[in-house]
C-alpha cells in the first residue's frame, strides 16, 4: 500500500541524484507523455544547484503540458524521502576522472573494457565507490519511507540493488534496465517480416529472461501468439559472422558510432549456446575472456567508449540545460523513452498489470544461482506490488559463465561492508578480464586503482593502497 497523506490520485516521488543531466530529464518527459501520474517529484542531489535547475525545467514542462506534477529540490535527503511513495536512485559513483582511471589503468596493463561500469576492473572499483553511498540511501529509506517502492537505475546494478537490500532487508526495490529491449526489438522485427506488416513493437514481445544484469539471456520470446525463439536462433546463426542491424549505424553521429553495435556478439553467443543473449554487445563482451571479443572489438562490430567522450557529452548537456533554465519558454519534452519506469509506477498506483524484466533478490525463481543473489528475470508489477516470476534455469554451459560473476558480486558486497581487504583483492584477481595478467601484476593494478580513487572511498577501503 502506498503512503497516503494527500489526494489518492497523487504520489510523492523522491529522486536521489535529481541533478542528473540525463535520467531525471528522461523521467520528466516520460511523465508528460504518460499523462496519468500527478503529484510531487523531489529532486535531491549533492549538487543542489543542478537539482534546482532540473526542478525549474520540470515545472515549466509540467505547466506547459497542463499536468499536476510539481518539482522541488530539497537540500537534504531526509526532506526528500519523508513520506515518499516512490524512490528513484540514479547517482554517479565518483567522477569522470575516476572513470578515466577505471579504464586507463587497466588498459596500461593490456586489459580492454568497452563500458567499465558493471564487471571487469572498472565495474569492480565503481562498485567499491558506490556501495557505501547506496547503503546510506537504503538506511535512510528504511527510516523515512519504509513502505516506498524503490527503483535503482545505477550501475553496477546487481551489486548496488543488493546494497539497498543489505541496508534495509524489508525494502521493496528493483533495478530497472533497458538492455533486454534490444533483443525484443529484433524479435518484433522478425515477426513483422514474417507477416509483411509493422504490426508489432518491442512492447508486444514477452520474453522469459534469465541471468544477471547486463549478462541476460532469453529462452522464450512470444509475440503474435507463438514463440519466435527458434526463428531467432536460426537468424542469429545466419548472421553470426557479420552481424546485422535493421538500419546502418549513422557514422555522422558520434553517439551512434560509440554506443550502437551490430548484434554480432549476441548472435555468436546464441550460436555457441543455443539460447539468446539479450543485452547489448558492449556489455556482454566484458563478462567473458578478453580474447573472445574485446581484443578484436572492431571486427565484432562494437566500440570501446572513451571517457573523454563522456566528459564532452556532459559539458554539452550541462550547457543545454543551463540555456533551458534561463529561457523564458518551456523546453520541448524529449521523445518517449524506452524505459519501463513510468509504466512500472503506473502499474503500482493504478492497478495495471505489467510484466517486464527487472533485477531483484533470488527467492528461488531462478534456479542455479544462490538465494538472495540479485538476478534479472521477469517481474510482475501490479496494484498488489512487485513479484518475481519463476524463470527456470540457464543451460549448464551458460550457467557456468554467469554463476561465478553472480557469486563474485555477492562476495564483493559482503567484503566492502566488512572492509575485508584480502577478500577484495582476491575477488578482483579472479575476474575473467583480470586473471590472465597474473596475480602479481593484477595485485599491482588493484592497488594502483585504489590509490587513484582513494578520495572517493571510505578510509578503511582507501587504506588498501597504503
Image (cartoon, grey):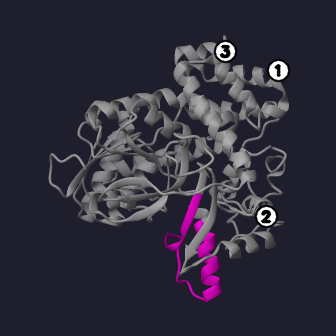
Can residue 189 be found in the magenta stretch? yes
Secondary structure under tag 1 reads: helix
The answer to whether any part of residue 257 appears in the image is yes
The mark closer to the camera, 2 or 1, is 2
Q: Position of residue 311 (x, y in %)?
A: 59, 41
Compare residues 201 and 222 and report the one nearer the observer.
Answer: 222
Residue 114 seen anywhere in this rendered image of the structure: no
**Mark pair 1, 3: CA separation:** 15 Å
Name the spot of residue 102 as percent of width and height, x first: 67, 32
- 427 w.r.t. 372: above or below: above
Instruction: Name the residue beneath numbered marker 1.
Output: 440
Query: In the picture shown, does residue 33 fall above or below 313?
Result: below
Q: Which residues are magenta?
A: 184-209
Indicate the quadrant where residue 63 lies.
bottom left
Packing grade of label 2 (10 A; few <14, some 14-19, many >=20) is: many
Q: Earlier in the sequence, mark 2 or mark 1?
A: 2
Q: Which residue matches tag 2?
A: 271
Within 10 Å of disc 1 (Cα), the crowding (few <14, some 14-19, many 20+) is few
Q: Nearer the viewer, residue 464 or 260?
A: 464
Which numbered dot is residue 465?
3
Q: Tag 3, which secondary structure?
A: helix
Residue at 73 percent across and 46 percent down: it is 400
Amino acid at each position: 500500500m502506498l503512503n497516503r497523506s494527500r489526494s489518492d490520485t497523487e504520489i510523492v516521488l523522491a529522486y536521489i541524484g535529481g541533478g542528473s543531466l540525463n535520467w531525471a530529464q528522461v523521467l520528466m518527459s516520460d511523465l508528460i507523455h504518460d499523462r496519468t501520474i500527478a503529484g510531487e517529484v523531489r529532486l535531491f542531489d549533492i549538487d543542489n544547484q543542478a537539482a534546482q535547475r532540473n526542478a525549474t525545467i520540470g515545472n515549466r514542462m509540467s505547466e506547459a503540458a497542463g499536468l499536476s506534477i510539481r518539482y522541488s529540490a530539497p537540500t537534504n535527503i531526509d526532506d526528500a524521502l519523508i513520506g515518499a511513495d516512490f524512490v528513484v536512485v540514479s547517482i554517479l559513483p565518483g567522477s569522470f576522472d575516476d572513470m578515466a582511471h577505471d579504464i586507463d589503468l587497466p588498459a596500461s596493463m593490456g586489459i580492454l573494457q568497452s563500458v567499465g561500469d558493471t564487471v571487469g576492473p572498472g565495474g569492480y572499483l565503481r562498485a567499491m565507490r558506490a556501495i557505501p553511498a547506496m547503503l546510506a540511501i537504503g538506511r535512510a529509506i528504511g527510516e523515512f519511507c519504509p513502505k516506498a517502492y524503490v527503483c535503482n537505475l545505477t550501475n553496477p546494478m546487481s551489486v548496488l540493488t543488493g546494497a539497498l537490500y543489505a541496508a534495509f532487508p524489508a525494502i521493496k526495490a528493483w533495478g530497472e534496465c533497458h538492455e533486454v529491449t534490444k533483443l525484443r526489438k529484433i524479435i518484433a522485427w522478425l515477426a513483422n517480416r514474417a507477416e509483411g506488416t509493422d504490426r508489432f513493437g518491442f512492447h508486444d514481445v514477452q520474453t522469459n529472461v534469465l541471468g544477471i544484469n547486463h549478462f541476460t539471456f532469453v529462452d522464450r520470446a512470444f509475440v503474435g501468439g507463438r514463440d519466435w525463439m527458434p526463428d531467432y536462433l536460426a537468424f542469429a546463426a545466419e548472421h553470426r559472422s557479420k552481424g546485422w542491424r535493421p538500419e546502418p549505424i549513422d557514422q555522422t553521429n558520434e553517439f551512434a558510432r560509440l554506443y550502437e553495435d551490430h548484434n554480432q556478439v549476441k548472435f555468436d553467443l546464441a550460436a555457441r549456446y543455443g539460447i539468446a543473449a539479450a543485452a547489448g554487445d558492449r556489455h556482454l563482451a566484458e563478462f567473458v575472456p578478453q580474447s573472445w571479443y574485446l581484443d578484436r572489438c572492431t571486427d565484432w562490430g562494437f566500440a570501446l567508449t572513451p571517457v573523454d567522450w563522456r566528459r564532452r557529452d556532459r559539458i554539452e548537456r550541462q550547457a543545454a540545460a543551463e540555456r533551458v533554465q534561463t529561457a523564458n519558454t518551456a523546453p520541448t519534452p524529449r521523445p518517449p523513452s524506452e524505459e519501463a519506469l513510468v509504466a512500472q509506477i503506473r502499474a503500482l498506483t493504478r492497478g495495471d498489470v505489467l510484466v517486464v524484466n527487472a533485477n531483484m533478490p533470488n527467492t528461488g525463481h531462478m534456479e542455479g544461482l544462490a538465494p538472495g543473489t540479485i538476478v534479472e528475470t521477469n517481474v510482475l508489477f501490479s496494484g498488489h506490488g512487485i513479484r518475481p516470476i519463476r524463470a527456470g534455469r540457464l543451460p549448464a554451459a551458460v550457467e557456468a559463465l554467469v554463476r561465478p560473476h553472480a557469486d563474485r558480486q555477492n562476495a564483493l558486497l559482503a567484503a566492502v561492508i566488512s572492509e575485508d581487504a584480502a577478500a577484495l583483492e582476491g575477488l578482483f584477481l579472479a575476474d575473467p578480464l583480470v586473471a590472465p595478467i597474473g596475480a602479481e601484476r593484477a595485485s599491482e593494478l588493484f592497488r594502483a586503482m585504489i590509490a587513484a580513487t582513494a578520495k572517493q572511498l571510505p578510509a578503511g577501503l582507501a587504506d588498501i593502497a597504503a
